[in-house]
């Protein structure tokens, strides 16, 4: 059926209100079932043996002793997950990451797994597996890995994207370039030029729920997988392909998810759990420990970035350039490329060039983390922008407003922008009381902007109307933070019925068509578009049924406020029929009433934010305190404003942790030294102030209600906003994230000494 | 290995179970008693997702042995509501959207209940330090603090 996704202005009844979420009571009473809260009869406990070495050839694995231990039902190695990827390099990397094949490529890389009757037996069995390693030289630092002298992680990798094909293998998998104009000409026009190098350390998404699943492979070749994931349809495809199953034979049910932030878009232990279950002939529950989560899942890239920006005296940027080096773990990725695309996306630039290098290191495979790659690029660029404004003698907000991208600007990564929010968020920040509040001694204020693309993608929903007129909405995008409430609001809006009359659930992979995962801030954007489409299809049927009940032409029936209304002078005596009345009669008018929608949600509106923060720095210890924090972001249309605020606040808090504390610390031996929440310190309640939010609504022209994704942009500005605040408070430019007390103190002392 | 016989009280009910001497109370609650409201986020007492109240004291149940529950009184998230009537903290967490993914929520509710029992009128700072043993990665804590403040004022009036 034709569906017009274009924005049309309307007065909202349900959208924009703040009802209690449909999954709320279960979550405050402990009844909601997460990954580890599900059990099956006869279930075994799965455990994974992991490499203690950063880089080692696996000569031999002897599992015989473990297999003989009473209570052990299956032991598997890479031999039990044969390579069925048929030349698909990306899938091969996923397979190799799930279970090392020839080499262990990082501390924590899975090498074998067991399934046993209980956890104690499984742990004992792991100790009985003998792995003969030949330890190889390793490299964990992104700059070190790029040197010609660095140990090679994969000798089949020759850098792509160079003008001439290289003759020697390298740890650099790919070079990418974006931009337009002529930067040499642009720098020639500049009166001021700032050039700086920056580093950011690796961080983890830090979801509180470790990866968990229950796999059950039946002897008839079908299987079930219960798992915490951001994309159960994608997990099904990957697991089915790696295990040699037909996708439809594997039913994947997404549990409640205890945080993902991108980290649950990749399969890790799920194929292993399925392989264990297949071998044991029993269900297997596999739950990662926190140590395993840190060592073997997540994290984001560590980066090294050079930025150069030039401007005229009047504050116009004439040229901008960045070179971005991002660690990928041991497998090829496109992380630097995303950084290169997003780096200058906030600005209107005549001459811009960004170059990205994807770098292999002996660390866990880099995974998406909320607006992946953008925060580090924004840290480097927004720090340099602040410094440049200072050199010119302009207010940092005014300088950004002068150079902000607008509707019609050609973005630094290619496309021409439609209506966008960068200018309005800057104006709102400029006028915000926060900007005028006084600061005390050792306190500094910083601000910064951020951009994220937002994704759309394949989406499918079913809207079923019950005989009693209540509505079941089945969606295929996992609810990571309140989207069932938002989608219920959208269905209520379109059907013209109360929110309470709708129940939204996330359907399993056998109950609904394929959906891309919940990533790229697409959940509410995409599924609301499909929900509107499904509701409109249902309304068409409701009108037909009403016409039948009245025995009038369907063209004379319109749908208003949850009722079919007969239009036209001849039908004046017909009372409106409610959705409930039409549903009650459906058995006699043609059967069940439903609306379905299968679409590719195109036109995800790009998103911009501006953040302001005040930081106090103790010059004696280098410790910091966040005094005040304000987020201004464009939501397009906030469907459930409270949950939009929650996304803004949560992203800011993660960014604050990244900016000030969080980092992966590797020893010289290539082992992760802080795989736990005690030593990898995410912000706690007493670390943070209230986080003020301001929602702007610049409608996305490609969505019927104007919705844009809101989940990710909020983590993009904090690194830079805090770095600018700390730099202003401490009187020295900070160039290395996280700005932990020792780093701040060293910078202050270097400045004093210099 | 022979199990340890434990007799205890959970949410007002007498409960008896057998556990291994090295088994944590969290594992007993989740795996033996089917009380999966307490979550394991770390297993090392750093995240607070497994918080329960043990004889009026807030503890991480991952740091307590099952055998230590002998003769004690345990309060878990499953006992917080009275039938279908939610505790004010539960109600305020819903109204303020103080949860996104919700996996830390049972631990926060236990910690907040313990805090308000000991300090019915806490300042924002006292709430922030009182809940500093519980990690939330989704909310930035803003709405959690506001929900606890609101619940405290409702409970004072009650």
Image (cartoon, grey):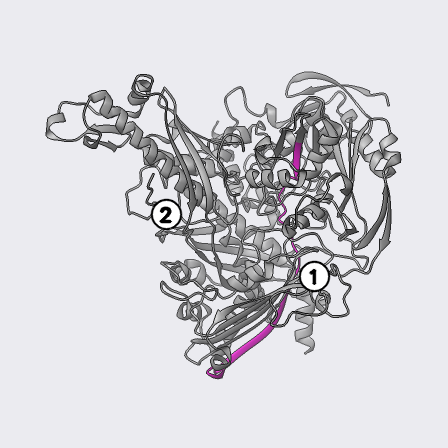
10 Å neighbourhood of mark 2: few (<14), some, or many (≥20)? Answer: many
What residue does disc 1 label?
A157
Q: Residue at x 60, y 35 (%)?
A: A246
Please tell me in which quadrant of the rendered image residue A300 appears: bottom right
**Mark 2 or mark 1, which is nearer to you?**
1
Q: Is residue A606 left or right of residue A620?
A: left
Does residue A131 lie above or below A224 as drawn?
below
What residue does disc 2 label?
A703
Q: Quadrant of the C terminus of chain A?
A: bottom right
Q: Pick whichever, B110 or A416, lies toward us.
A: A416
Q: Position of residue B9 (x, y in %)?
A: 69, 19
Does residue A101 lie above or below A548 as drawn?
below
Q: Quadrant of the N terminus of chain A?
A: top left
Is any atom of residue A204 visible in this view?
A: no
Q: Which mark is residue A752?
A: none
- The magenta stretch is A188-214
Q: Position of residue A480 (x, y in %)?
A: 53, 40
């Amino acid at each position: 059926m034709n569906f017009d996704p274009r924005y049309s202005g309307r007065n909202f009844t349900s959208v924009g209100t703040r009802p209690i979420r449909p999954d709320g009571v279960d979550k405050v009473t402990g009844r909601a079932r997460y990954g580890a809260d599900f059990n099956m009869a006869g279930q075994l406990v799965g455990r994974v043996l992991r490499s203690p070495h950063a880089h080692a050839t696996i000569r031999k694995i002897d599992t015989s002793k473990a297999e003989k231990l009473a209570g052990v039902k299956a032991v598997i190695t890479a031999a039990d997950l044969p390579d069925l990827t048929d030349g698909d390099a990306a899938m091969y990397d996923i397979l190799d990451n799930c279970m090392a094949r020839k080499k262990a490529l990082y501390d924590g890389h899975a090498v074998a797994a067991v399934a046993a009757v209980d956890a104690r037996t499984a742990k004992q069995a792991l100790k009985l597996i003998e792995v003969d390693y030949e330890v190889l030289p390793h490299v964990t630092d992104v700059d070190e890995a790029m040197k010609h002298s660095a140990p090679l992680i994969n000798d089949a990798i020759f850098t792509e994207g160079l003008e001439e094909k290289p003759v020697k293998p390298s740890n650099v998998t790919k070079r990418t370039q974006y931009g337009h104009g002529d930067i040499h000409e642009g720098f020639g026009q500049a009166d001021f030029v700032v050039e700086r190098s920056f580093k950011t350390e690796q961080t983890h998404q830090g979801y509180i729920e470790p990866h968990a699943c229950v796999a059950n492979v039946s002897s008839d070749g079908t299987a079930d997988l219960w798992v915490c994931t951001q994309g159960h349809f994608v997990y099904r495809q990957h697991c089915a392909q790696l295990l040699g199953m037909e996708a439809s034979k594997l039913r994947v049910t997404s549990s409640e998810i205890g945080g993902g932030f991108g980290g649950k878009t990749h399969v890790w232990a799920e194929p292993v759990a399925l392989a264990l279950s297949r071998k044991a002939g029993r269900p297997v529950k596999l739950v990662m420990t926190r140590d395993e989560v840190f060592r073997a899942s997540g994290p984001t890239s560590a980066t090294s970035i050079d930025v150069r920006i030039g401007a005229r005296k009047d504050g116009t940027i004439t040229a901008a350039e960045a070179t971005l080096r991002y660690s990928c773990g041991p497998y090829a990725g496109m992380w630097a490329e995303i950084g290169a695309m997003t780096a200058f996306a906030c600005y209107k630039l005549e001459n811009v060039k960004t170059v990205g290098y994807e770098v292999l290191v002996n660390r866990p495979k880099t995974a998406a983390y909320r607006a992946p790659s953008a925060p580090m690029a924004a840290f480097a660029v927004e720090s340099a922008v602040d410094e440049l404004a200072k050199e010119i003698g302009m207010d940092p907000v005014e300088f950004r407003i002068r150079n902000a991208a607008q509707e019609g600007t050609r973005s630094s990564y290619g496309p021409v922008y439609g209506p966008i929010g960068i200018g309005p968020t800057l104006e709102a920040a400029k006028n915000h009381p926060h900007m005028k509040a006084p600061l005390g001694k050792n306190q500094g204020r910083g601000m910064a902007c951020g951009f994220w693309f937002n994704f759309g993608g394949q989406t499918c929903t079913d809207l079923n109307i019950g005989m009693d007129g209540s509505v079941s909405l089945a969606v295929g995008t996992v609810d990571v933070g309140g989207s069932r409430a938002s989608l219920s609001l959208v269905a209520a809006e379109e059907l013209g019925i109360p929110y309470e009359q709708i129940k939204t659930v996330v359907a399993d992979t056998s109950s609904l068509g394929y959906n891309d995962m919940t990533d790229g801030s697409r959940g509410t954007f995409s599924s609301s578009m499909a929900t509107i489409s499904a509701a409109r299809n249902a309304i068409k049927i409701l009108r037909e049924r009403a016409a039948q009940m009245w025995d009038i032409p369907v063209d004379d029936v319109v749908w208003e406020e949850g009722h079919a209304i007969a239009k036209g002078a001849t039908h004046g005596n017909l009372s409106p029929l409610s959705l409930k009345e039409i549903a009650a009669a459906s058995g006699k008018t043609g059967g069940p009433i439903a609306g379905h929608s299968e679409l590719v949600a195109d036109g995800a509106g790009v998103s911009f934010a501006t953040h302001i923060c005040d930081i106090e720095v103790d010059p004696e210890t280098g410790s910091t305190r966040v005094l005040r924090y304000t987020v201004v972001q464009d939501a397009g249309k906030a469907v459930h404003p409270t949950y939009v605020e929650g996304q803004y606040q949560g992203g800011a808090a993660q960014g604050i942790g990244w900016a000030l504390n969080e980092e992966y610390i590797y020893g010289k031996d290539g082992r992760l030294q802080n795989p736990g929440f005690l030593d990898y310190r995410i912000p706690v309640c007493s670390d943070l102030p209230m986080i003020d939010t301001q929602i702007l609504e610049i409608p996305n022209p490609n969505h019927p209600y104007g919705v844009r994704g809101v989940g990710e942009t909020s983590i993009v500005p904090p690194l830079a906003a805090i770095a600018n605040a700390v730099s202003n408070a401490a009187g020295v430019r900070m160039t290395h994230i996280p700005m932990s007390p020792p780093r701040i103190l060293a910078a202050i002392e270097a400045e004093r000494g210099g | 290995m022979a199990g340890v016989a434990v007799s205890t009280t959970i949410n007002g009910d007498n409960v008896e179970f057998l556990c291994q001497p090295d088994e944590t109370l969290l594992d007993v609650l989740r795996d033996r008693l089917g009380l999966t409201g307490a979550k394991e986020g770390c297993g090392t007492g750093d995240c607070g997702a497994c918080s329960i109240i043990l004889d009026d004291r807030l503890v991480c149940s991952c740091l307590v042995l099952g055998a230590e529950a002998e003769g004690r009184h345990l309060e878990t998230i499953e006992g917080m509501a009275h039938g279908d009537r939610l505790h004010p903290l539960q109600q305020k967490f819903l109204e303020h959207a103080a949860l996104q993914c919700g996996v830390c929520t049972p631990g926060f509710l236990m910690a907040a209940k313990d805090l308000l029992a000991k300090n019915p009128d806490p300042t924002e700072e006292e709430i922030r330090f009182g809940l500093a043993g519980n990690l939330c990665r989704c909310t930035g804590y803003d709405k959690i603090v506001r929900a606890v403040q609101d619940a405290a004022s409702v409970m004072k009036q009650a």
